Amino acid sequence: MKVWFWPLVVGLLSAIGLLSGLLYDGLGDAVSWLALLVPVALSVWHGWLRKNAADDRRA
């Protein structure tokens, strides 16, 4: 279960963000932005760490 927990959380946040953006206005739009920001932020963060780790190995 440890392996699947965080991917499930990110997937659920993505689904919540997409559905709230489609179905609700006002507060739903804010929930959508926040929920969809998390997967993007995680991707950027991991990409940044991977890039820095690759730079450290070259040096």
Image (cartoon, rainbow, N blue to C red):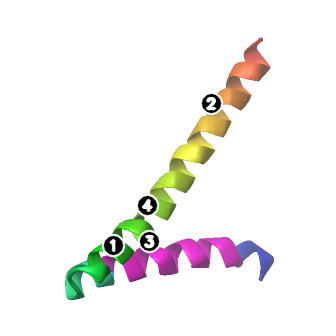
State which region is magenta.
5-18
Mark 1 is on which residue type?
Ala
Q: Residue at x 66, y 37 (%)?
A: 50
**Which circle's residue, 2 or 1, is located before the other in the chain?**
1
SS at mark 2 in the image? helix
Instruction: Say whether marks 4 and 3 touch (CB < 8 Å).
Output: yes
Quote the CA–CA distance across marks 1 and 4.
Answer: 11 Å
Residue receiving disc 2: 51
Residue receiving disc 4: 37
Q: Which mark is residue 35?
A: 3
SS at mark 1 in the image? helix
Instruction: Assess disc 3: are there few (<14), some (14-19) or many (≥20) residues with their C-alpha within 10 Å of its C-alpha.
Output: many
Q: Quadrant of residue 58?
A: top right
Residue receiving disc 1: 30
Instruction: Assess disc 1: are there few (<14), some (14-19) or many (≥20) residues with their C-alpha within 10 Å of its C-alpha.
Output: some
Quote the CA–CA distance across marks 2 and 3.
Answer: 25 Å
**Which circle's residue, 1 or 3, is located before the other in the chain?**
1
Q: Quadrant of the N terminus?
A: bottom right
**Which circle's residue, 2 or 3, is located before the other in the chain?**
3
Residue 27 is situated, as x and y percent measured from the top left of the image, at: 30, 81
